[in-house]
Image (cartoon, grey):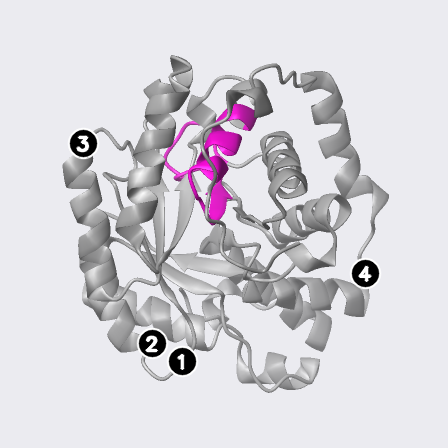
Amino acid sequence: MSTDRNPGVPLDLSWFDRIAVNTPATEARAAQLTTRRSLKKNYQAAWLVNAIHCMDLTTLAGDDTEDRVARLCAKARDPLADHILAGLGLDGVTTGAVCVYPTMVAAAVRALEGTSIPVASVATGFPAGLMPLDLRLAEIRYAVDQGAQEIDIVITRAHVLRADWQALYDEIAAMREACGAAHMKAILATGDLKTLRNVYKASMVAMQAGADFIKTSTGKEGVNATLPVSLTMVRALRDYGARTGYRIGFKPAGGMKTAKDALAWQILMKEEMGTDWLRPDLFRLGASSMLADIERQLEHHVTGRYASSSRHAIA
């Protein structure tokens, strides 16, 4: 497959208009993923370290400040305590990115100066997306001007629920153009889309419109990332790659809090897409609280003891 950026293709309903998703079979396959592969000891530790490499360390709180963002960036630069790194035989680890609101992008860029960690920003009226399109596009341009290298956009869910695929395509294509060189992650807010069939169709439209990543959730919906939804989206990006030769990234987000979750979603990518998709250029985990549990599990691996959460720097 091509390593070039997805240029998108003209909207083609024939790629998905007759698609059927067997929900019980999808749920059964998702349930099997975490039981068919067992990761223990050094192997589990290696997969947990990889999860950190693929993590978008995120703060999207209403009371975010520049100081909080700076603290988050410090954790992104050094997510593991020195004694854990030494015990693992590693010189250093960083997260895949830091994700913030547009007004916090400049602070994150300053705090990450001298590193290769990209700054991602949500935009387009996150989380609901219920703003006029011109304002949503202006928000993208603002975030890019502030230094964001990745933009996580949100779609208008009503376009999916009305099956207005042309409107959805045009909206996402305009957002992709506004992103310029910044990579675009299309948040589908899958918990609002009602059916797995809608999830597949929305995924395909987003990719046809030029999305670099497809992402499950904002983290603000009633239901966020689940393995059946993720499996449906991954099958869609696999189908898109087979048709076009372009590789699309995947980002589950929302509701993932434990090291066990980090392993489950990596197993999904390994089983469905192969090891190429276990890299931050094609896979991200949208999380923050998950990092604390990963650090706790890695400390146990190194020392044989579980440390109190107060011993780990908060993100």
Of pointers 3 and 2, the one earlier in the residue sequence: 2
- Using the numbered discs, state the Cα–Cα distance from disc 3 to disc 2 in whole angstroms: 31 Å
Of pointers 4 and 1, the one earlier in the residue sequence: 4
- Using the numbered discs, state the Cα–Cα distance from disc 1 to disc 2 in whole angstroms: 6 Å
Disc 3 designates what residue? Answer: 131
**Left or right: where 144 falls relative to 39:** left
Front one among 144 and 114 = 144
Give the residue type at disc 1. Thr
Disc 2 designates what residue? Answer: 112
Disc 1 designates what residue? Answer: 115
**SS at badge 3:** loop
Of pointers 3 and 1, the one earlier in the residue sequence: 1
Callouts 4 and 1 close, C-beta under 8 Å: no
Q: Percent x, y for residue 224?
A: 48, 34
**Left or right: where 117 falls relative to 140:** right
Q: Is residue 271 above or below residue 208?
A: below
Give the residue type at disc 4. Lys
